[in-house]
Image (spheres, rainbow, N blue to C red):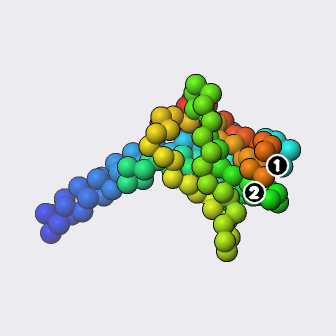
């Protein structure tokens, strides 16, 4: 019986350590600010070795023709990723390509009108 309790304690501690490590890897941006994208935040995490961005539940995808995910790195390079609006719904998360070395800001960009709709920044660039 003591052996089973000890095993359960070890598994519980391991699960807690994994959960804590996962939380430490997640970073959340400031609030989106801009003329059309001005609600919610974006979080960055590493899952299965992939860099993933997700908008918060309170983020509202702007009602524009082509709202698009863009990221800006710490050197000011801009990378256009995927559209927010997809057939049948919204793309509220995106996998960041490996060639993007870090992310200082996440932007909502209207690819149709070629205008910035809003952006959110991280306190320190995420990798």
Q: Which residue is mark 1?
A: 113
User: Who is closer to the viewer here, 55 or 10?
Assistant: 55
| Circle 1 crowding by C-alpha within 10 Å: few under 14, some 14–19, many from 20 | few
Report the residue at 62% width, 27% height from top: 76
**x and y percentages locating residue 77 in the rendered image:** 60, 31
Q: Is residue 52 left or right of residue 50?
A: right
Q: Is residue 74 shown left or right of residue 35? A: left
Q: Provide the residue designation for mark 2.
A: 66
As drawn, 85 above or below 80: below
Residue 69 place in picture, x, y as percent: 65, 49
Q: CA distance from mark 1 to mark 2?
A: 8 Å
Residue 24: image location, x then y, percent: 45, 42
**Secondary structure at numbered mark 1:** loop
* Callout 2: SS: loop
- Tell me, yes or no, if residue 58 can be seen here: yes
Q: Residue furthest bottom?
A: 88
Q: Is residue 110 left or right of residue 78?
A: right
Asked if the residue at tag 2 contacts the one at tag 1, i.e. Cβ–Cβ closer than 8 Å, the answer is yes
Horizontal and vertical percent position of residue 42: 63, 48
Horizontal relation, residue 61 to residue 76: left or right: right
Q: Nearer the viewer, residue 74 or 39?
A: 74
Q: Residue furthest right?
A: 35
Looking at the image, how many numbered discs can be counted on the residues?
Answer: 2
């Amino acid at each position: 019986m003591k052996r089973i309790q000890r095993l359960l304690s070890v598994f519980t501690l391991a699960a807690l350590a994994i959960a804590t490590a996962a939380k430490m890897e997640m970073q959340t941006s400031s609030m989106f600010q801009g003329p059309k994208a001005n609600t919610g935040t974006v979080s960055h995490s590493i899952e299965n070795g992939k860099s993933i961005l997700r908008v918060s539940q309170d983020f509202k995808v702007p009602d524009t023709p082509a709202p698009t995910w863009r990221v800006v790195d710490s050197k000011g390079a801009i990378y256009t990723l995927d559209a927010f609006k997809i057939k049948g719904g919204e793309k509220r998360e995106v996998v960041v390509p490996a060639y993007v070395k870090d992310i200082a800001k996440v932007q909502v960009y209207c690819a149709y009108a070629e205008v910035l709709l809003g952006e959110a920044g991280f306190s320190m660039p995420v990798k």
